[in-house]
Amino acid sequence: PFPLYLLPAPFRRRLSSNSSPTTSPSSSPPTPTYFLPAHPTTHLQCQKCLTDLIPTTCIISKGFTGRHGRAYLVSPPNALIGPTPTPTRGGWKTGDIPNTQTHRAVSRQLVTGAHTVSDISCVRCGSVLGWKYVDAAEEAQKYKVGKFILETGRVIKRTLEDGEDEEEGCGGGEEVEFDSQDEDECEDLFSGIWTPRLAGVRRRRKARG
């Protein structure tokens, strides 16, 4: 069996204390559900809701350009990490990035020529994170087919140290309550993604400047 790795921390704790499955209300965002057999110390998360995506070992190049600036070229995790995990009810398919949705393929003129690409978005908050290369017009560009662009402005790296902080909310075991005066937290609550963990991480980032 594959250990629960890419589930956000609150869901891992819930599953460890209760083995019976929990059904989320239909109005709630989809619950990320992906199993990964390794425990890398650093991986990429959605910048907006902190949903886990892939280990940083999946990064092929940091020198690409997305629609909003610098971007990573990455491979889907099953191509680089151990056995292929089982697709889940969330719709994840082998060859895709976990906890993302792949949209309809379209033709797009990029810096390196004409390509067919599919935008990818976070399955939890809907943020567009980048795209998947489906085809390339030029033979020299076909090495990118099946790989993905992740915009550096739409994802963040989570290191082991960051992960320890996030488990504690704001740090020191303090209880985190919703701040109605904070525009980011109000937007998160309206989007249905606010959690004490997410709020705690955002507050630490602001405190660090």
Image (cartoon, grey):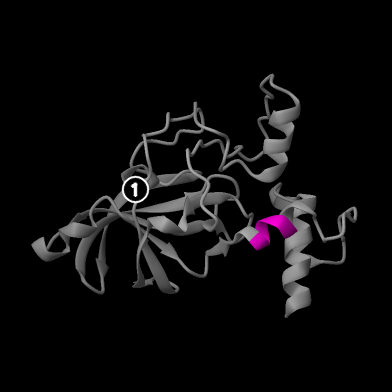
Disc 1 is placed on an element classified as: loop
Residue 166 at x, y percent in the picture: 72, 56
Task: Using the rendered view, name the quadrant where residue 161 is placed.
Answer: bottom right
Placement of 68 over or under 98, stated as above or below:
below
Name the foreground residue: 85 vs 50.
85
Give neighbour class at mark 1: few <14, some 14-19, many 20+ (Cα, 10 Å). Answer: few
Decide if residue 133 is on the left or right side of residue 190. Answer: left
Can the viewer see residue 187 in this picture?
no
Q: In the drawing, does residue 148 fall left or right of residue 4?
A: left
Q: Is 73 left, or right, of 190 in this rendering?
A: left
In the image, residue 179 above or below residue 54: below
Q: Residue furthest left?
A: 139
Percent position of residue 30, x then y: 60, 38
Counting from the top left corner in percent of width and height, residue 168 is at 79, 54
Residue 162 lies in the magenta-colored region: yes
Residue on which the image places disc 1 = 80
> Where residue 35 sits in the image (x, y, percent)?
51, 36
Magenta span: 161-165
**Residue farthest to the top, as pictured:** 20
Magenta-colored segment: predominant secondary structure: helix
Q: Does the magenta-highlighted stretch encompass residue 184? A: no
Residue 207 shows in the view: yes
Q: Amino acid at mark 1?
A: Leu
The residue positioned 56% from the left and 64% from the top of the image is: 156
Towards the viewer: 163 or 124: 163
**In the image, what residue occupies the spot 48% across and 43% down?**
38
State the image quarter where residue 22 is shown.
top right
- On screen, residue 29 above or below 132: above
Task: Report the label total.
Answer: 1
